[in-house]
Image (cartoon, coloured by chain):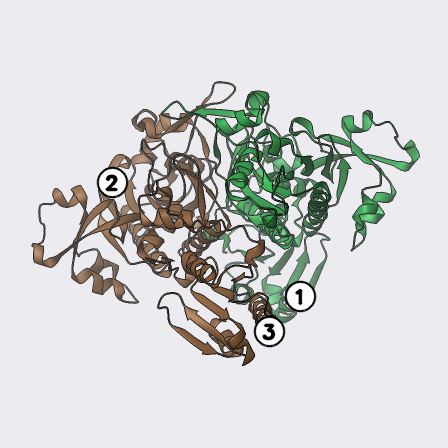
Chain colours: A brown, B green
């Protein structure tokens, strides 16, 4: 992509209303624009990151045996009346009436809808276990939306739902998602701590939140120091992991067997994922049964597994930035490589830029080529702000001897080399 | 994917409430399930097709220089009051109040939102032309939703918006989208006729609808016979194409210079795309200006370009089916290959099935392996119903001599061959 043809409205000034760094950087880097309180337009750069995150989640969910479906944003009130949550949910639920005065709502989550799909289509133990997931926009009418997409009203969520014949199998499904979540966040370059969690309005008793470590996090989290070492290992023993102490906020406050302070790390976290086991709560309320191998009706055991997809964009920035801007992990970077033409009116520089641009594109490397007539300073600042992991810098002096500079955003390290060598490193 | 682990709730009976063949087949093939009137859940098989269609559209939009953004589903009423469409839109607009009693709506289209993005971020002629598009769910509260996803209330739409400095440039943008639409539908194996169209509530005077030829279409269309020949050519001359006569419904009725009946084909069509040029309608109403190269304020010329993404799934089926089920064009098929194991308890058959399944997956061929313990008839019927383009049939007799049967869904043609030869044909 040539920057002169892209839509990347960068801001020099820090927006006044943005309180946290990810919100400021997402606005400054032209990733999002507010449409109204808690509701955002995703501009091309932001959407690229959102889609990268989606792709990683989808890939790992599929590997874990999840089956992707897509449930609508608008749901009928009846299903929520059946589960008993329609009145309980309160004002965060966006309630809507259609032209025939039928009560509907914008889904804040989808336990009821997925349960309805299940009961109408799955009848036998032979079809279980099942894990159905979707990546869909949700709406929660927060009283005070804030921090950009971190706590928006319309937000993108991956929500998965597992159905099993008995507790043993349900626990396996739960552990499989727990393990999958660790893989997903690791692929995004994130350090997360799974903490024991309250299950809130949704009910249940086996529940973990996945917290990205960041000072701006809304939760206060406490975890056993040794946990960090364990999480760094390639093959993680979940049984062992779940035995370590880790809890957030009230869960920690109300805990009876807290560890002594010297064994604990205390920090702040951003919740990016949540896994619940809630047993037969919905299957009983909504009368969902399947036949077991004796022909008897059984209420399936359920769990639900959420990831805040749009929130993750902000969380990754909170965990990866410096004073100049964002530092994307390669796996979610909107463009892997930036090309900076230091002098657009110098023929040899432009020729060299054009050539490496074509070659990178031929290799399917995502590249953003700054071909604008702007100052050198503005071009450096732009690539650092938007966080391109690798930057190719080409000017008249280097072009004269056929060399470019390759800069790594994360370290600032710059090395002069021949274009072929840079290509070798980037492909 | 092994069918025993998939979620594919096939129906033997034809659902009573489905009036058109695509709706019946989408229900029977386990692609969708109604959640409420005009609102559908997409099950795994249906979602695969929806995503294939999305991918083709995205690819061609990007090639044509479109820039993908994502606008929220929920929009503020203020923007529609500004454009003057808030009252005009009527009951098809789903109007919503949030917890603070602010008026919002579920976007039926996004001219206002994209115009607002434009005016806040683009100021200079240097940034034009621009084509911003998004693929997002829309809601139109149809009084009588019908025909499944063909005329649903919540539906997926690709909507693009072009911004140009003058009419000449706007006409180029229009023609580029017109040409892109022909490419998109061709890639989906569809025969479409672009007809002159009324621009309806949206206003304007340069407007074409793209109609898929199908007897179940809601529009009556009339077109010059020679048009079909022209549309079959690889490189289409748009100037020439646009001169041929083609019109739908009232546009035809009110036409002054109709062609004589013997030069006309009369048929029915399903509208799957629409391109409009509407000039400065929105830029004037919403006071959007950009500086021209003399520093003067100019109202940009706009156009909008829609494709019914979810509707296309149904339209493709209307155009590609027989009495046994769907016949997917390769480009949008949910799975390219089906494997039918005629005898799951025969060791050599199962071994041969397993082997070719692994090999196809290694080559990234999407394959659905029917490993269920079902009758041969049920397995054949399932693959024909869901429309898998290529079917590999393996039974004890063939397995004994190391051969399989390769069946083409479109023609029913079956050829016996070695697995290596089948692989060669499918990869």
A65 relative to A354, above or below: above
Which residue in the structure is indicated by mark 1?
B425
**Residue most extreme to the top:** A101
The residue pinned by badge 2 equals A199
Residue A145 pos. (x, y %): 34, 36
Residue under the image location 49 percent in, 64 percent down? A338
Q: Which mark is residue A348?
A: 3
| Rendering coords of residue B350 (x, y %) | 52, 63
Give coordinates of residue B82: x percent, y percent.
Answer: 54, 26
The residues bearing labels 3 and 1 have C-alpha atoms spaced at a distance of 47 Å
Residue B84 drawn at (x, y percent):
58, 24
Question: What chain letter is assigned to the residue under label 2?
Answer: A
Q: What element carries label 3?
A: helix
The residue nearer to you, when weighing B138 against A79, is: B138
The chain to which mark 1 is attached is: B
N-terminal-most mark, 2 or 3: 2
Q: Which of B137 and A203 is in front in this view?
A: B137
């Amino acid at each position: 992509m040539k920057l002169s043809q892209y839509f990347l409205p960068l801001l020099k000034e820090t927006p006044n209303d943005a309180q946290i760094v990810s919100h400021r950087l997402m606005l400054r880097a032209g990733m999002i624009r507010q449409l109204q309180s808690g509701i955002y337009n995703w501009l091309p750069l932001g959407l690229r990151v959102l889609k990268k995150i989606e792709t990683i989640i989808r890939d790992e969910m599929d590997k874990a045996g999840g089956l992707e479906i897509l449930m609508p944003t608008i749901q009928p009130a009846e299903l929520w009346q059946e589960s008993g949550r329609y009145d309980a949910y309160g004002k965060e639920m966006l309630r809507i009436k259609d032209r025939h005065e039928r009560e509907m709502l914008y889904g804040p989550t989808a336990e009821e809808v997925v349960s309805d799909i299940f009961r109408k289509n799955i009848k036998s133990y032979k079809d279980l276990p099942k894990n159905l997931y979707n990546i869909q926009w949700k709406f929660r009418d927060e009283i005070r939306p804030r921090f950009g997409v971190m706590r928006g009203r319309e937000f993108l969520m991956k929500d998965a739902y597992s159905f099993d014949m008995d507790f043993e199998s349900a626990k396996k499904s739960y552990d499989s998602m727990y393990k999958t979540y660790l893989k997903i966040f690791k692929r995004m370059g994130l350090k997360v701590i799974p903490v024991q969690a309250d299950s809130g309005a949704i009910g249940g008793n086996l529940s973990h939140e996945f917290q990205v470590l960041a000072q701006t996090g809304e939760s206060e989290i406490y975890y056993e120091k040794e946990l960090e070492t364990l999480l760094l290992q390639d093959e993680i023993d979940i049984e062992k992991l779940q035995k370590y102490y880790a809890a957030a906020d009230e869960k920690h406050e109300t805990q009876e067997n807290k560890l002594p302070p010297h064994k604990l790390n205390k920090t702040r976290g951003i919740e990016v994922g949540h896994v619940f086991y809630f047993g037969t709560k919905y299957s009983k309320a909504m009368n969902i049964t399947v036949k077991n191998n004796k022909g008897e009706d059984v209420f399936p055991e359920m769990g639900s597994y959420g990831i805040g997809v749009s929130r993750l964009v902000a969380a990754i920035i909170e965990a990866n930035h410096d004073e100049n801007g964002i530092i994307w992990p390669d796996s979610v970077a909107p463009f892997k490589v930036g090309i900076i033409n230091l002098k657009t009116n110098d023929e040899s520089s432009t020729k060299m830029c054009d050539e490496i641009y074509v070659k990178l594109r031929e290799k399917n490397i995502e590249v953003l080529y700054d071909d604008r007539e702007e100052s050198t300073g503005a071009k450096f600042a732009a690539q650092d702000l938007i966080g391109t992991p690798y930057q190719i810098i080409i000017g008249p002096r280097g072009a004269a001897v056929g060399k470019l500079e390759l800069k790594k955003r994360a370290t600032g390290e710059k090395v002069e080399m021949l274009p072929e060598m840079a290509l070798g490193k980037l492909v």
